[in-house]
Amino acid sequence: MERFEIRVDDALLRDLHERLARTRFPDQLDAAGWDYGTELGYLGQLCAYWKSGFDWRAQERALNALPQFRAKIGGLDLHFVHARSPHPEAFPLLLTHGWPGSFFEFHKIIGPLTQPEAHGGRSEDAFHVVAPSLPGYAWSEAPRARGFDARRIAGVEAELMARLGYARYGAQGGDWGAVITSWLGATDPHVAGIHLNMLFGGPPPGEVNPEANLDADERADLADLARFRRDEVGYQQIQSTRPQSLAYGLSDSPAGLAAWIVEKFRSWSDCGGDVERRFSKDELLTNVMIYWASGCIASSMRIYYEMRAAGAAALPGRVEVPTACAVFPREIYRLPRRWAEARYRIARWTRMPRGGHFAALEEPALLVDDVRASFRELRRG
């Protein structure tokens, strides 16, 4: 287990700036807005800032302020943040990101979780935080064989927590991190409980009319989910069937990579159509730069293929550990509580007043407060 620092070569940055300067942008229909995908005018402005205004070295220094490590786990060199609280009785908490995010998503919540008293909290709510980059993301080694789905990633993370000496811990996740965290709750006896800010699943099996007795909020949630499945899953179909073909363009063009990723930050967040109402250009580009600098876009997308190949076995059965759910109003998957209870042992259910898919970046205080409350009883054993 070795300390790790991000050190992007100057040559890579020079090459990046040259590619940005040579970008051949496509045309766009008049008044198309974002309806056809990433809007041309916005992407042009973002790429101009990326080339001439964005200070990667400053972002690199900020990332390196987080205690990062690499270790051989499950046969792979795994990159992870391990931020121990100064409080020795702190409870271990594993944070798992998804796509198109990264460990960067958690940079706003690590301090409040590890040192709550410095951020308006109480010392008894302190956590030791572990935040790995998923295999094939950022500076975690990519698997070289088929079949590395969410269950196998959960096994890697369980091994990591054991190697770190945590015999009992909690886990939190959204997006693919929610599926991986669910697998941890279902398979690792060392997990005391889980916290999710997104839920996958469907209606309780065998129900003739599963949408009966839903309240107005739950009906609205399902209507939003239907719209998402109708209008938003093109990326998912490509990444779950032909990710390699897509990866050539995204690996070669920084503008293409930014367009593919930033569109999701706009569409899936609680931004009202203005992505920079929720994320600054520096935040958007730092996340994109992690993909560009590490060259991980191809390997990051393969989980979609592997999960599709796994079929019915992609999701765990019933999860019996206590499960807390933070339901953000602009999250892309929001299930009725009764549906969730068919798969999870729900111990806490919180409807948030605002926020979307990238909760740790969008609404860090709301997420931290809910995580603290969710584990207060569980941490006592």
Image (cartoon, rainbow, N blue to C red):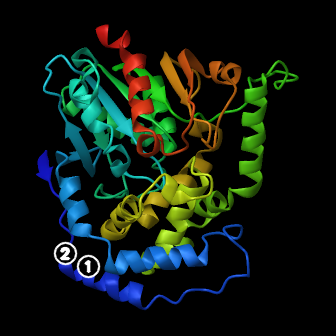
Q: Position of residue 92 (x, y in %)?
A: 27, 25
| Residue 107 in view (yes/no) | yes
Please name the amino acid that badge 1 sits on.
Leu
Quadrant into which the N terminus falls: top left
Query: Relative to 249, does residue 126 appear above or below in the rendering?
Result: above
Along the viewing direction, whichever of 318 and 20 lies nearer the viewer: 20
Q: Residue at x 21, y 67 (%)?
A: 57
The reply, left or right, for residue 32 in relation to residue 153 is right
Query: Residue 219 lies in what quarter of the image?
Result: top right
Q: Which mark is residue 147?
A: none
Quadrant into which the C terminus falls: top left
Q: Residue at x 25, y 50 (%)?
A: 79
Along the viewing direction, whichever of 97 and 114 lies nearer the viewer: 114
Q: Residue at x 30, y 45 (%)?
A: 107
Along the viewing direction, whichever of 218 and 276 lies nearer the viewer: 276
Q: Position of residue 329 (x, y in %)?
A: 62, 37
Query: Residue 16 lies in what quarter of the image?
Result: bottom left
Along the viewing direction, whichever of 241 and 215 lies nearer the viewer: 215
The reply, left or right, for residue 266 in relation to residue 140 is right
Q: Position of residue 229 (x, y in %)?
A: 73, 50
Query: Relative to 248, does residue 217 appear above or below in the rendering?
Result: above
The reply to whether dot 2 and dot 1 touch (C-beta < 8 Å) is yes
Q: Residue at x 30, y 41 (%)?
A: 131
Sort mark 2 into few (<14), some (14-19) or many (20+) by Cα contacts within 10 Å: few
Please name the amino acid that badge 2 sits on.
Asp
Q: Which mark is residue 12?
A: 1
Helix, strand or loop under label 2 = loop
The reply, left or right, for residue 39 in relation to residue 180 is right
Which residue is disc 2 drawn over?
Answer: 9
Query: Relative to 141, does residue 8 appear above or below in the rendering?
Result: below
